[in-house]
Image (spheres, rainbow, N blue to C red):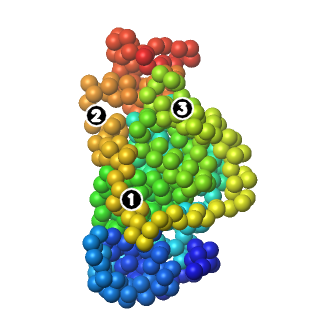
Amino acid sequence: MNDRRGERPLRLSDAQLLDWLQLARSDNIGPRTFQRLLEYHGSAGAALKALPRLIAKQSGGRAIRLAAREDCEREWEALRRQGGQFLTLDDADYPLTLRAIDAPPPVIAVRGRLDVLVRSMVAIVGSRNASAYGAKFAATVAQELGEAGFVIASGLARGIDESAHRASLATGTVAVLAGGLDKIYPSENVPLAEALCECGALISEMPIGWVPRGRDFPRRNRIVSGLAYGTVVVEAARRSGSLITARYANEQGREVFAVPGSPFDPRAEGTNDLLRQGATLCTRSADVIEALASVIARGPQHQSATLTSDHEPDLFEAVAQPDEASEAAVLRPIAPAFAATVAPQDFVERLRALLGPSPVSIDDLVRATGRPVAEVQAAILELDLQGAIGRQGGNRITLMP
């Protein structure tokens, strides 16, 4: 049987797209099962016709339940009202890099500009509890990569993701969601998501209305890495969800870059571990550009499926991921974004969360927090009185170990 991913993709008719959506939304039909049904029956429509007979023969295992056509039509209409559209693996606008991974999502929902999906991407991910230094580095690299022609992919999370998206708004950025396109998480990034659609795109493989669960974030992460030729990890604790993205990037045959950090900062333990394991050192955007030049020239390499039996569970659907506990933590904000309503007594601790062993200027802290200079200086004074910070040259401060 020919590999359909190697064929030239075509735009589907409305009826064909509904066939794809109905098959993809059916219970217990994941990306691998979808692909095998498509290869065996030749089309999604033919697979749908064959499913009742296959379901009748089922004995044990996880039951397949066909999605209702009417539900799929309603979802499509809801996506249209939001200004979005579906792309399938057979669609010419489906990202080539994502199509090349093992078990790519058969259908993705997209809001924004499709042209960014055909450009070369770099993923930038990292800690939600980012330091001011880490956020600034992520923003600098994202801006410079954007100016070099790359689109920046990330997960719209707090911290490093958010900094990377904001810094690449002018040049193009793609955010991958763990929930439906109408369920932005975290909610304070809704304005960023809307701005992002003007110059980039939001994408999700989940249905409209789907509220993200802990197990949905690893699924999102494998799309983030799958879109990109390389993934840059900026600050990651040892059980950070960003390391899941790095693992997928490695499994997908993509480049993994890690930004070194202080051995005294827990947020750098994961990235330092990646460097020991062979990740490419990243201290500037040129490190990424130089490493990816030959990779991009070759184009994305298709992964081979690694199915071991006719009844192998679908991707992420039956076997719990060892890192799911850390991913579930995204539903409990680690370091909430600074908001206009934050009480002054809370601000000291929130400022402390932005500091680490690497020196940060007070000007950078003012920009990172969006708070008045006087309020930032008052919080720094409080931390100084507690003996929590050290002062460096150039009006910079560090968090004491």
User: Could you give the CA–CA distance between mark 3 and mark 2, rounded to whole angstroms?
Assistant: 33 Å
In the foreground, 169 or 399: 399
Q: Quadrant of the rendered structure where residue 130 is? A: top left
User: Could you give the CA–CA distance between mark 2 and mark 1, rounded to whole angstroms?
Assistant: 38 Å
Q: Amino acid at mark 1?
A: Phe
Sequence-wise first label, 2 or 1:
1
Q: Secondary structure at mark 3?
A: helix
Disc number placed over residue 391 in the picture, else none: none
Q: Amino acid at mark 2?
A: Val
**Which residue is at 30% across, 54% downward?**
213
In this figure, which residue is indicated by the disc labeled 3? Answer: 272
User: Could you give the CA–CA distance between mark 1 and mark 3, rounded to whole angstroms?
Assistant: 27 Å
In the foreground, 53 or 374: 53
Camera sees residue 59: yes
Camera sees residue 81: no
In the foreground, 277 or 287: 277
Quarter of the figure with the C terminus: top left
**Which residue is at 39% across, 69% downward?**
311
Q: Secondary structure at mark 2?
A: loop
Q: Amino acid at mark 3?
A: Asn
Asked if residue 204 lies left or right of residue 251, the reply is left
Tag nearer the camera, 1 or 3:
1
In this figure, which residue is indicated by the disc labeled 2? Answer: 342
Sequence-wise first label, 3 or 2:
3
Percent position of residue 121, x then y:
59, 55
In this figure, which residue is indicated by the disc labeled 1? Answer: 316
Sequence-wise first label, 1 or 3:
3
For label 2, count other residues whose C-alpha is less than 10 Å away and answer few (under 14), some (14-19) or many (20+).
few
Q: In the rendered view, tell whether residue 280 sits above or below residue 45.
A: above
Q: Secondary structure at mark 1?
A: loop
**Which residue is at 37% across, 72% downward?**
29
For label 1, count other residues whose C-alpha is less than 10 Å away and answer few (under 14), some (14-19) or many (20+).
some
